[in-house]
Structure formats: structure tokens, C-alpha cells
Image: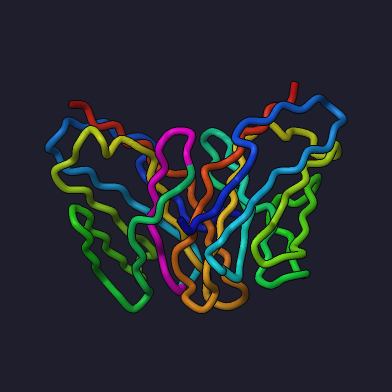
Amino acid sequence: SQQGEEDPQALSIQEGENATMNCSYKTSINNLQWYRQNSGRGLVHLILIRSNEREKHSGRLRVTLDTSKKSSSLLITASRAADTASYFCATDAKGGSYIPTFGRGTSLIVHP
Amino acid sequence: DGGITQSPKYLFRKEGQNVTLSCEQNLNHDAMYWYRQDPGQGLRLIYYSQIVNDFQKGDIAEGYSVSREKKESFPLTVTSAQKNPTAFYLCASTILANTGELFFGEGSRLTVL
């Protein structure tokens, strides 16, 4: 079963604009992560936010977590054509083995 | 360089054949995972292993088998019992104590002819 679901499924913007992607999940989590995937490649880790954190920054990335709404958002500021990729959230449910569960992803296209 | 290596990158299989996808890591990670990716469906967990000689089924284990004889290696066999094996397969690893990021290989694309 897929724990996290990203929204929107696809996003098309111009270079310089901000891109916002959302992730909703169903059960309590230990942490939430965002990954990036270029077409035909493996996933690359972007940022991890733990359940007791509300916001994290890394360069042009800003992630928020609202555990009461079971949702997270990823903001990419001042987007570049090189940001074109698919973005996935992964959640680790509380209890049991460490099994990150991925959503279906958001496909981002940044037009030069 | 440390990392996780998958091979082959592309593989073609005839119906009825078993194929094995290799996954090797030199990161000294405890846990290893196999995910399957289909268009529009994200990543689905096939098998995972947290310790040598032990592994657990994920959500879609039917038609697949794995082994974990060495910490560094976690090969996946796609058997003839897997009815729709054409997909992109991703291997990942992590340090369990950190319960943090997964490190992914570059993937193996399997096509059934």
C-alpha cells in the first residue's frame, strides 16, 4: 500500500517561478523524506524532516510538515530548467521495521 | 567511491525465463530494499532485508525471490511466475540506526519480449 500521495501529479512552470508540491499520508510517521528522480535514473535524497519538526530548509528547498493534517509540502524557489524531474515523498510509519513507503510522485517541468 | 551498483542497466527476457538483477553496495549499510517502478504508480516494495541471511516480503513479492548471503549483496530474481515483469527495478540501502535517507542505485530496466 502507498502511504504518501503527492499532489499535483504534474506541474509545469517557467524558470524563475516557485514550484510547490504537496504530500498527504495516512498513518502516524517517524519521518518524511523528499526525493528527486531524473528520467530513467535512480532516486536522490533531497531532505528529511522528522515528526517533531515543522520546517526545514536546504538551499532553494523548503519543506514543511503538518502532522495534524498528515501533510507535507516541498517548495522549490527560483526554479531552474535543471530542476525538471519527478519528486517523491516517502514516509516511515511509526512502529515495526524501517520501510520507507513512496507516493506516485509529482512530475515537474521547468521551461527555460 | 562508495555507492550502490545495479546491473545490468537494461535486460531483455523471454517469457518463461528467470532473470537475476544484481545489487551491490560498499557503504556498509545494514538494510537493503528492492522496489519496482511502473509508470504512474510510484515505487512499490518487493523485498527488504535488514540483516544478513534474513529478508522479508514487501507488498508485491509474488513472482520474485531474493537472497542476502553477504552484507554487500542483495540480488533479485524475477521468476517465470511473475506475470507482468516489465518494469524499472530500483535497489536501495540505508543505515538502520539512522532511520534516514535511502541510497539508490541507477536502476535496471527489464523488458519481457
- Residue occupying the far front of the picture: B1
Q: Residue at x 68, y 52 (%)?
A: B46
**Magenta stretch contains residue A31:** yes
Say whether residue A15 is left or right of residue B75.
left
- Can you give x and y, in whole percent of width and height, for residue A94 in the image? 52, 75
Q: Quarter of the image holding residue A107? A: top left
Between B23 and B82, the residue placed more toward the observer is: B23
Q: Main secondary structure of the magenta part?
A: strand
**How many numbered markers are drawn?**
0
| Rendered-image quadrant of the C terminus of chain B | top right
Relative to B73, does residue B38 appear above or below in the rendering? above
Between B46 and A27, the residue placed more toward the observer is: B46
Q: Quarter of the image holding residue B54? A: bottom right
Q: Which residue is drawn at 42% across and 70% down?
A: A31
Q: How is the image coloured?
A: rainbow
Q: Which residue is drawn at 53% across and 62% down?
A: A100
User: Magenta segment range?
Assistant: A30-41
- Can you give x and y, in whole percent of width and height, for residue B83 in the image? 79, 34
**Magenta stretch contains residue A100:** no
- Can you give x and y, in whole percent of width and height, for residue A11 in the image? 30, 35
- Can you give x and y, in whole percent of width and height, for residue B28 in the image? 56, 69
Q: Residue at x 39, y 56 (%)?
A: A45
- Residue occupying the far top of the picture: B113
Say whether residue B76 is left or right of residue B87.
right
Relative to A21, does residue B16 appear above or below in the rendering? above
